[in-house]
Amino acid sequence: MTQTSEMLGQTTNSSGKRRRVIRIVLTAGLPIAVLLLSFTLGRYSVSLSQMADIFRARLLGLPDPGPDSVSTVLFNVRIPRIAAALLVGGALAAAGASYQGLFRNPMVSPDILGASAGAGFGAALAMLLSLGPAGIQLLSFLLGIGAVALTYSIGSLVSRRGGAVLSLVLTGIVISTVFGSFTSIIKLAADPDNKLPSITFWLMGGLSLVGLDDLAILAPLVFIGLTPLLLLRWKLNVLSFGEEEAQSLGVNTARIRIVTIICSTLLTAAAVSVSGMIGWVGLIVPHLSRMVVGPNYKVLLPVSALYGATYLLLVDDIARSALTMEIPLGILTSLIGAPFFIVLLLTGKRGWD
């Protein structure tokens, strides 16, 4: 009997070690592998040895080895695009995970309160008015935040009768629909030979036009939005017990809800203003992260951000390498995300039980 118990204990320990090894590989090894792979993919091939030689020369203050075109592609195109994919993917996944914990709903995504719809309308309006790249990003960002502010204001009025969380979700759906209709009106009024294709292509999402100037704006916004969420992520664990239970434990649920919404909105609006409409990242990545590391937000939130960055970078690699022409990211994330989410629902439901 004792020997049987010892054997069972050893089996349990070995299986636990295997799970820890898998988690370490997925959390640390996979992002590094995808990052290195991303530098080599594209219409212009750059090997890892070439990249290492160029970085070494830059660090030592030496002239770049090899053709100038390699350095130009690496520093002006590939590095900004890779950095943008990491920032956008991490921002959307972190926002999605935060919203899922806040609303206690696995079907919630970063656009639940209207941020993506508002940002899309802002970009379409800016293109219609010929405001240029900076104007497109600014108006997209502002209207993304404005849409959520409108949702929160109306939802707060409705929630005086009870059900604050449900009121916000339902109001967000309505606001998203309204801004989606406004975007359709803009497309109807746009010049079909010039502006309409630009609006349509932007709404499909992509990172082909991202440059260093975009990163200079995107990176601080992502840092500002992500930092409070990481500092307060343990309180999302308390909110999962329910609002009354969280209040009984001394958590100011109204304040946490406002901070989470503001930070998640900032992340979503900043990401959409640079990349366009990219869906499913903030919906499926938190589910995948929950299956790997569990529901504890102390670990789940940073891992979701890391997995989201890795996932979007991998999808962007496919977008710019699979065909002779680049595939819009929004199309790929939908094609990959929808069936993958069905599989997650079938195999990973235990995370929300």
Image: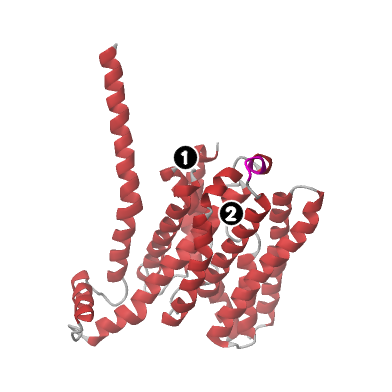
Locate residue 159, reporting x and y percent. 77, 52
Locate residue 133, reporting x and y percent. 53, 84
- Residue 192: which quarter of the image? bottom right
Residue position for label 1: 347
The C terminus lies in quadrant? top right
In-front residue for pair 38/231: 231
Above or below residue 233? Residue 213 is below
Q: Could you tell me the amino acid type at mark 1?
A: Thr
Q: Could you tell me the amino acid type at mark 2?
A: Tyr
Q: Regarding mark 2 in the picture, which secondary structure is present there?
A: helix
* Mark sitting on residue 99: 2
Q: Which residue is found at the position 33% from the left and 39% from the top? A: 19
Locate residue 166, reporting x and y percent. 71, 50
- Magenta segment, prevailing SS (helix, strand or loop): helix
Question: From where the camera sits, is residue 192 visible?
Answer: no
Above or below residue 267? Residue 75 is below
Q: Which residue is found at the position 54% from the left and 40% from the top? A: 352
Q: Regarding mark 1 in the picture, which secondary structure is present there?
A: helix
Q: Earlier in the sequence, mark 2 or mark 1?
A: 2
Question: From where the camera sits, is residue 61 visible?
Answer: yes
Of marks 2 and 1, the one in the foreground: 2
Gap between marks 2 and 1, in whole Å? 22 Å
Q: Which residue is found at the position 75% from the left and 63% from the top? A: 153
Magenta residues, start to end:
246-250
